[in-house]
Amino acid sequence: MLRLDALNAVYDRLEHRVVITIMGAVAAELQAIGHRPNFFYLQHAMGLASSMGLGVALTRPELSVVVFDGDGSILMNLGGLTTLARYRPRNLVHVVFDNESLLSVGGFPTATSTGSDIAGMAKAAGIPRTATVTSLEDFVAAFDAALAAQELTTIVAKVDAKGPAGFVTDLALLENRFEFQRWLRNAAAAAAPSHSQS
Amino acid sequence: MLETTRLDAARLTASFGVPDRNHPVPVSVDSSRLIYNALKESGVRLMSALPETWLVHLIRMAEDDPEMALVRLAKEEEGVGISAGAHLAGTRSAMLMQNHGFLAAVNGIVSCAQLYRIPLVMLISHRGEFGERDPWQTEGGGVTEHVLQALRIPFAYLDEPSHVAHRIRKAQTLAYSANKPVALLLCRDLMWEEAT
């Protein structure tokens, strides 16, 4: 499965949701598909995208939050899985694209390439719903099921170690940050969809 | 002024365990209450924390307050991400940590909060000062201010009750006007009541 195909397949579900991504290929590819003001790309601070998602999810329970994480990033904040599990916000879906490598710095293999199981660790941390998927069809099914479940879910999507040619985009970091904050400020509770709607 | 969004704080803090209250430590309840009240009055509605001795009362106050969401962390750096998310979503937060926790959070502070201009109000227990008896705390005390200075993070000391409220208020004012992290160092003279 290509990460780009996975993002494309669920892109229409993201229109009214809070989306937080890690740096690198995920950010570049989602922007290539089409940036929206409700998308925030954490272009550094590896490991903290899931923590940011938790901060939004806990303080805005009326909003649906999707985090697009990666194996290299979550491996830097495995303790964060226990914090996610401890507060288990029902409005958060945590997707980990696992290409078993640090792609943007040359493709060096991560520990998932030698058997470390992120979904297994998430489950053991106490995250109520976890899944590992390897096909596009299974990814879309797991993503939709997670949105419908209204229960904290970590989906590990095994993807090819292939990414875009470059990682720098036209969107300035601070432009993204203030636009995203404005979108959150204007996202009136009445206009926001419930987590289960896709 | 940022709008404060509603928080289901009771849901967050209920049933997540109560610390042992039967082993009192000579940490000042009065000073902790002063700090807590100042944070509350300045609009803080979410606190992230990793427990340490000097912070026990502050954490219990947050836990007992149905209007406060307390997020217990595995490592302090997570708190930077949580505060960043809360800020962008419209909720004021504060971080409670030991200075060694601050040291553990430095990359998040730099490459999340500073890179993205996120206001952070960090309350850092300043272990390893004069009077420190725990050998393991002594190295961190000597580097804390230097690291804050190297990161260009404005900081002030909370070492005497009379200035606690207004220093917290002013620290938060600067954090939000500058969109930057600020730090308040909780000192032994304020926090610790044991005769030395």
Image (spheres, coloured by chain):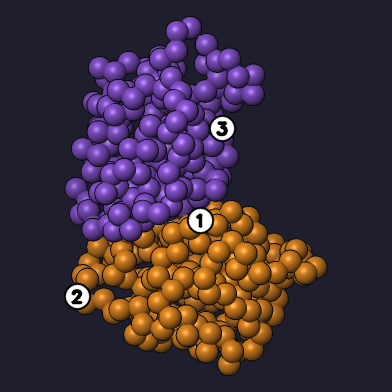
Residue extending farthest bottom:
A137
Q: Chain of mark 3?
A: B
Mark 1 to mark 2 CA distance (whole Å): 29 Å
Which residue is disc 3 drawn over?
B100
Looking at the image, tell me whether mark 1 or mark 2 is earlier in sequence order: 1
Where residue B84 appears, as percent x and y from the top left, is 40, 52
Which mark is drawn over residue A108?
Answer: none
Q: Residue at x 43, y 19 (%)?
A: B26
Q: Which chain is orange?
A: A
Mark 3 to mark 2 CA distance (whole Å): 43 Å
Q: Chain of mark 1?
A: A
What amino acid type should be assigned to the residue bearing mark 3? His
In the rendered image, which quarter is residue A132 located in? bottom right
Q: Observer-nearest residue: A67 or B177?
A: A67
Which residue is disc 1 drawn over?
A83
Q: Which chain is purple?
A: B
Which residue is disc 2 drawn over?
A190
Q: Is residue B47 left or right of residue A112?
A: left
Q: Is residue B124 above or below residue B85?
A: above
Q: Residue at x 37, y 86 (%)?
A: A198
What amino acid type should be assigned to the residue bearing mark 2? Ala
